[in-house]
């Protein structure tokens, strides 16, 4: 089984951003599972994320847009849309 430290949501549909994260100086981001939100409705995305959460319960869920792969001090900056998504997930049974 893969050692996954982060579940990432590619909400920007940018392959350039995904490659930058995988090649990041922050080695933990290399151990991530990336889910593309392309073509998924919000309920479908939440369903996919809940399945990933069951497989990797300790892995935080982050949006690709929240990560600055070039930053070494504070590479993660939360955004309101991803916060709302995480809040919706936490409200589910």
Image (cartoon, helix red, strand yellow):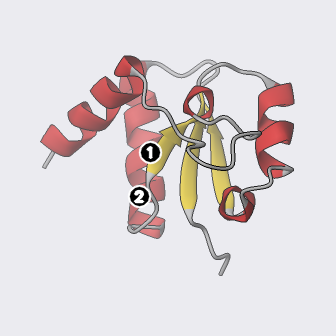
Estimate the x, y position of residue 56 in percent, counting from the top left: 47, 67
Question: Which residue in the protein does label 2 denote?
Answer: 53
On the picture, is 92 further left or further right than 31? left
On the picture, is 29 further left or further right than 49? right
Q: Quadrant of residue 30?
A: bottom right
At x 50%, y 41%, the residue is 62
Task: Say which quadrant the N terminus sits in.
Answer: bottom right
Q: Residues within 10 Å of mark 1 (few under 14, many from 20)?
A: some
At x 67%, y 34%, the residue is 68
Question: Which residue in the protein does label 1 denote?
Answer: 49
Image position of 90 with respect to 13: above or below: below
On the picture, is 71 further left or further right than 79? right
For mark 1, give the secondary structure.
Answer: helix
For mark 2, give the secondary structure.
Answer: helix
Residue sticking out furthest to the bottom: 1
Q: Are marks 1 and 2 in contact (CB under 8 Å)?
A: yes
């Amino acid at each position: 089984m893969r050692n996954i430290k982060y579940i990432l949501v590619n909400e920007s549909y940018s392959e350039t951003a995904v490659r930058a994260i995988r090649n990041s100086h922050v080695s933990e981001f290399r151990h991530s599972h990336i889910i593309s939100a392309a073509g998924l409705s919000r309920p479908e995305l939440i369903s996919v994320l809940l399945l990933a959460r069951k497989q990797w319960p300790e892995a935080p869920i982050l949006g690709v847009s929240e990560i600055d792969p070039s930053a070494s001090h504070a590479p993660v900056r939360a955004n309101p849309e991803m916060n709302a998504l995480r809040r919706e997930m936490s409200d589910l049974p």
